[in-house]
Image (cartoon, rainbow, N blue to C red):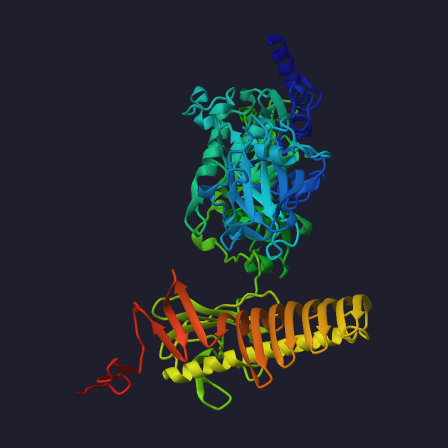
């Protein structure tokens, strides 16, 4: 070691060429090769001359030009695929779309196969400190961390619909020691791509995204973006063993903490990023002395100093970056340096940094100290090509899904006048700074610094030998009119003497001053789903109304609803009615067509003189959203208070139904006759199969006839069977007819089965029919079961029957059970407590909660209570 130092000293003092201080920007051999050896010091010995750059803006331009074209600028917004992707990790505040490592589908929901899509996304090749945010497509979403699903992870609030979840996110921070059980259970048995227990992903940060299919929520696999917390970083300020205060130790990563401090991130990259003992990125085996603790701590403290960006105090220089294995560490460091206006220098193999405003002068001199026997140079200003009077910049904006956003341009009209009424802008990309306020401060400092044109190259006496790039000196010069003027050393060279040649650039610490008033207005563009606004219910009115029968008499109370006309993309109107007293919904239908005259009379059975509340909603042809109207109150008219009218109306409905049943029975009797003479299905279009078993002896005839018909066309399908079992002798006959039919068209489906029996003796006859029928068409659905009996002599006949049905009236389904009989009896253990006969209902006993009546008479006829007229009379 002693011999090496002697050789080094001899080289500096006696080399044929001068030895120079080497800045980081130019120390390509030192940093790009990540010197584990002493190559950089060796290069300094043989005299490589480098500088820290003339101005911050020139450094930014030069650094970007030198940066290798290995990645797209800004945040990785699109998921990458394939095993040829480089490793990556995030330090500071940043986001990434990650790399797809596995994807698959499974499960069935409501008949939908492969209803769940699972995406396994690697976010970092190193353990990260946490998941700070998630974007789905163009919307930042909320993870319901308090409602974690046992397998899928955290539900996404924005993808919860109708009480069901449709997206979940599960996050692993890289500390996992076993494979995910959910993935093993769902995909472990996949014959082509099994997910096995060996797929742990040790040290890898990854997310599992599970989506349940829904056509309204997903048109394709969602585009994900994850905001990650930093990897743990070493901060010497928190290491009491190197002059800091805290438990951090370089040799114990378990003591480190996440950080977005840009000098802290840069320090760790230069010294090297490791996973355990495995080198990952940056420097290798760099000793701590090569990054002097005092220098770097000062830079880290400067980055943490609070500044008011216009929205309150924030740390001066924060940032983040996604490091990729295929990017030169020097290029990544350049982005970090740019985000905090830092100047980096490598001086004899030692790396030093200056952040923000230059420090105080460490050396002062006057004209008398300048060695005049050596050449001097002075440049009062640069060329026009090097002149800048405006700065334009882009940066990743977290509020706009981390896309590169234009910061407010920094223009100065006074400078443009000085430069011949020309605007001379320079663009800068701050890829490692996702803070708009910080970007504005960087731009202002760059513009001010770029206007410091004066540069000198002079020779100073031997006492200036300790000077290094980034040091500040103070010069008092009568010749140049300087009074303690500050200059930054941008280059140092030792000629073949004890003197020192320095290159100086004028600086002014005031260039870095900032106040909230300096902030330029900025706006964040909308990022998220651009949904169609929900259409409100317009022109909505409700009124009491009355339904009338064919004779013009008031039949039922109802409600008239009306709405605005002439609207586009509206097909129907959805109406709900509830009882005002209880809130129970008694009507809910969207069957009202949206057409002129733009109103509807609701068809359900409403109670008379009762308060209801009604609301409506448009049903569009498209899937755009609509909103319910407010509940509007309405009281139905007091119609059908007359019990006789009510019974008469209902009785008329039932009578019409029985007339239909009678017509069916007549048709069935005719059918038996037609079958007997082979007139039934013959001549019908389709395929007909007819089989007859028949024997006759004189006037006696017995026969069984069976017919089958099928027919199919573009708009109809029909299947039908008829069967007759009959016997007759002259005027005495008996028959049984069975008929079954199934028929469908484009807008109707019918299924029915009829069984009929007939017996005839001269003029005396008896017949019966049992029928099942079901119909579904545009008007609604109907189902009916009926029994009808008929018997008589030549002078007349008698009928009895019953039916049970579900029918659709006015878009509302109803049910009814009707009986046609002279006497209707309900038995209870042989007793007849319930009897309806001759229009009179007789009960042995009754318990009635509420009675609505017009007239009450005592059994003796002496007491009369006229409720309609509020009159009570008692007579002897």
> Is 89 or 677 nearer to us in this picture?
677
Identify the residue at horizontal 46%, vertical 82% (top origin): 649
Count the labels in the image.
0
What is the x, y in percent for residue 104?
A: 67, 41
Q: Where does the image place residue 192, in percent across and percent down from the top left? A: 73, 34
Location of residue 691 (image quadrant): bottom right
Q: Is residue 562 left or right of residue 491?
A: left
Q: Which corner quadrant holds the N terminus?
A: top right
Query: In the rendered image, which quarter is residue 190 located in?
Result: top right
Furthest toward the left, the residue is 876
Q: Is residue 221 visible?
A: yes
The residue sitting at the front extreme is 698
Q: Report x, y in % for residue 453.
A: 59, 46
Quadrant of the image for the C terminus? bottom left
Does residue 687 appear left or right of residue 293 in this picture? right
Q: Nearer the viewer, residue 484 or 824?
A: 824
Residue found 42% across the figure and 81% down from its top: 647
In percent of width and height, residue 311 lies at 43, 51
Residue 454 appears in view? no
Seen from this angle, which residue lies furthest bottom?
551
Q: Is 587 located above or below residue 209 in the figure?
A: below
Along the line of sight, the residue nearer the viewer: 108 or 551: 551
Q: Say above or below: 89 vs 452.
A: above
**Side (left or right) of 318 relative to 583:** right
Of residues 172 and 713, the one drawn nearer to the viewer in this rendering = 713
């Amino acid at each position: 070691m002693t011999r090496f130092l002697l050789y080094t000293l001899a080289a500096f003092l006696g080399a044929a060429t001068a030895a120079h201080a080497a800045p980081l920007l130019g120390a390509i051999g030192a940093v790009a090769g990540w010197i584990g050896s002493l190559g950089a010091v060796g290069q300094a010995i043989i005299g490589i001359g480098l500088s820290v750059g003339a101005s911050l803006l020139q450094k930014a331009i030069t650094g970007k030009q030198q940066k290798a074209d290995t990645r797209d600028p800004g945040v990785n917004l699109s998921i990458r695929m394939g095993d040829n992707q480089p490793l990556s990790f995030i330090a500071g505040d940043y986001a990434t779309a990650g790399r797809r490592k596995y994807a698959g589908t499974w499960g069935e929901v409501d008949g939908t196969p492969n209803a769940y899509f699972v995406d396994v996304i690697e976010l970092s090749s190193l353990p990260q400190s946490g998941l700070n945010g998630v974007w789905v497509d163009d919307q930042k979403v909320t993870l319901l961390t308090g409602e974690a699903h046992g397998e899928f992870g955290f539900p996404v609030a924005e993808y919860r619909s109708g009480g069901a979840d449709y997206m979940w996110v599960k996050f692993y921070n890289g500390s996992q020691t076993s494979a995910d059980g959910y993935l093993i259970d769902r995909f472990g048995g996949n014959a082509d791509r099994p997910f096995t227990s060996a797929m742990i992903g040790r040290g890898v940060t990854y997310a599992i995204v599970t989506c349940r299919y829904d056509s309204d929520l997903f048109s394709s696999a969602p585009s994900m973006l994850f905001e990650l917390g930093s990897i743990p970083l070493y901060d010497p300020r928190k290491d009491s063993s190197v002059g800091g205060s805290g438990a951090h130790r370089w040799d114990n990563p378990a003591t480190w903490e996440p950080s977005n401090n840009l000098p802290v991130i840069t320090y760790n990259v230069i010294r090297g990023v490791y996973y355990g003992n495995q080198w990952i990125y940056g420097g290798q085996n760099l000793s701590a002395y090569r990054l002097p603790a005092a220098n770097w701590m000062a830079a880290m403290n400067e980055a943490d100093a609070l500044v008011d960006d216009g929205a309150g105090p924030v740390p001066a220089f924060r940032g983040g970056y996604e490091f990729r294995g295929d990017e030169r560490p020097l290029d990544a460091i350049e982005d970090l340096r740019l985000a905090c206006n830092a100047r980096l220098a490598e001086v004899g193999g030692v790396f030093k940094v200056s952040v923000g405003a230059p420090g105080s002068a460490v050396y002062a001199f006057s004209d008398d100290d300048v060695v005049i026997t050596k050449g001097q140079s002075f440049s009062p200003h640069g060329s026009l090509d090097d002149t800048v009077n405006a700065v334009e910049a882009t940066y990743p904006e977290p509020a706009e899904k981390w896309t590169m956003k234009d910061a407010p341009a920094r223009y100065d009209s006074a400078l443009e006048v000085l430069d011949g009424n020309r605007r001379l802008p320079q663009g800068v990309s701050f890829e490692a700074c996702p803070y708009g306020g910080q970007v504005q401060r960087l731009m202002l400092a760059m513009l001010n610094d770029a206007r410091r044109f004066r540069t000198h190259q002079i020779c100073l006496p031997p006492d200036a030998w300790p000077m290094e790039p980034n040091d500040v000196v103070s010069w008092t010069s009568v010749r140049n009119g300087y009074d303690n003027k500050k200059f930054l050393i941008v280059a140092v060279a030792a000629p073949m003497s004890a003197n020192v040649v320095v290159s100086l650039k004028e600086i002014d610490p005031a260039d870095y001053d900032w106040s909230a008033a300096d902030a330029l207005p900025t706006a964040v563009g909308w990022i998220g789903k651009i949904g169609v606004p929900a259409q409100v219910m317009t022109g909505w009115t409700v009124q009491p109304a009355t339904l009338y029968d064919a004779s013009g008499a008031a039949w039922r109370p109802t409600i008239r609803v009306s709405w605005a006309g002439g609207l586009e993309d509206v097909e129907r109107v959805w109406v709900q009615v509830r009882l005002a007293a209880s809130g129970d919904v008694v009507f809910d239908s969207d069957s009202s067509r949206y057409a002129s005259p733009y109103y509807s009379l609701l068809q359900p059975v409403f109670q008379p003189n009762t308060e209801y509340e009604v609301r409506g909603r448009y049903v569009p042809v498209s899937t755009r959203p609509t909103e319910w109207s407010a509940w509007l109150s309405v009281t139905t008219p007091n119609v059908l208070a007359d019990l006789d009218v009510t019974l008469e109306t209902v009785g008329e409905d039932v009578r019409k139904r029985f007339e239909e049943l009678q017509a069916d029975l007549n048709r069935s009797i005719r059918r038996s006759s037609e079958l007997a003479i082979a007139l039934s299905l013959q001549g019908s279009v389709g395929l007909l199969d007819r089989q007859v078993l028949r024997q006759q002896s004189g006037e006696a005839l017995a026969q069984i006839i069976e017919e089958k018909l099928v027919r199919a066309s573009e708009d109809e399908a029909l299947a039908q069977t008829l069967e007759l079992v009959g016997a007759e002798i002259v005027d005495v006959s008996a028959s049984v007819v069975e008929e079954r039919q199934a028929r469908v068209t484009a807008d109707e489906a019918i299924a029915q089965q009829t069984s009929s029996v007939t017996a005839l003796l001269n003029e005396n006859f008896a017949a019966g029919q049992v029928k099942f029928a079901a119909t579904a068409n545009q008007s609604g659905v109907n189902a009916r079961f009926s029994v009808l009996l008929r018997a008589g002599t030549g002078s007349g006949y008698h009928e009895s029957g019953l039916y049970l049905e579900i029918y659709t009236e006015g878009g509302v389904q109803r049910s009814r059970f009707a009986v046609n009989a002279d006497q209707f009896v309900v038995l209870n253990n042989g007793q007849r407590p319930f009897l309806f006969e001759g229009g009179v209902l007789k009960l042995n006993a009754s318990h009635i909660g509420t009675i609505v009546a017009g007239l009450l008479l005592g059994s003796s006829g002496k007491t009369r209570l006229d409720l309609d007229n509020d009159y009570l009379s008692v007579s002897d």
